[in-house]
Image (spheres, grey):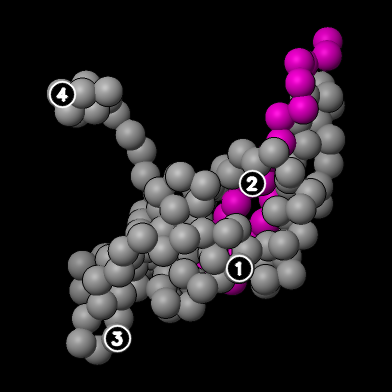
Amino acid sequence: MSESDSRSRITATPYLCCKDASSAIEFYKAAFGAEETMRIPEPSGKVSHAEVSIEGAAIYISDEYPEINVLSPQTIGGSPVMIVLDTPDVDSLFHKAVAAGATVDRPLQDGFDGALRTGKLIDPYGHRWMVVTERGEIKV
């Protein structure tokens, strides 16, 4: 893909605000196998901006900045947004995330159509996650 081609497409990257971004990054490493690719710390220790990659999917993270309305789900009482991780082994990833400290929002289950297996989690920072494995064609 040429540079002009890469500039002509749209990408979407979640930007998560956490009360303790450094701790959240460690959680995402333990829970989802994230790799930290960048961190811009402030002298105070706050994380101004960080980036992690989960199997190539970028996620941005920062600490709270109430003065510019950058607030975490813990501060605002939850999040209506859900991040979906599509993985070849949903059971393993789900159990790994729970062992790292995620709360089960909906246990693993097979979809009514037989094509998906999913579970929902809430991380210790208030962000909602759905983990999913596509299992084949939809059965009607």
In the rendered structure, which amino acid carries the disc numbered 1?
Answer: Ala
Q: Is residue 76 shown above or below 6?
A: below
Q: Of discs 2 and 1, which sits in the foreground?
A: 1
For label 4, the crowd category at 10 Å Cα-Cα, with few meaning under 14, some 14 to 19 and many 20 or more, is few
Instruction: Measure the C-alpha gap from mark 1 to mark 3.
Output: 21 Å
Instruction: Tell me, for residue 45, which label it has, or none.
Output: 3
Secondary structure under tag 3 reads: loop
Q: In the rendered view of the protein, which quadrant contains the C terminus?
A: top right
Looking at the image, tell me whether mark 1 or mark 3 is earlier in sequence order.
1
**Residue type of the residue flagged with mark 3:** Gly
Return the residue nearer the eye: 4 or 61: 4
Mark nearer the viewer, 4 or 2: 4
Element under label 2?
strand
Is tag 4's residue or tag 2's residue first in the polypeptide sequence? Answer: 4
Q: Which mark is residue 4?
A: 4
**First to last magenta residue range:** 120-140
Query: Which residue occupies 74% across, 70% down?
Result: 99
Q: How far is the residue under mark 4 from the one under mark 2?
A: 34 Å
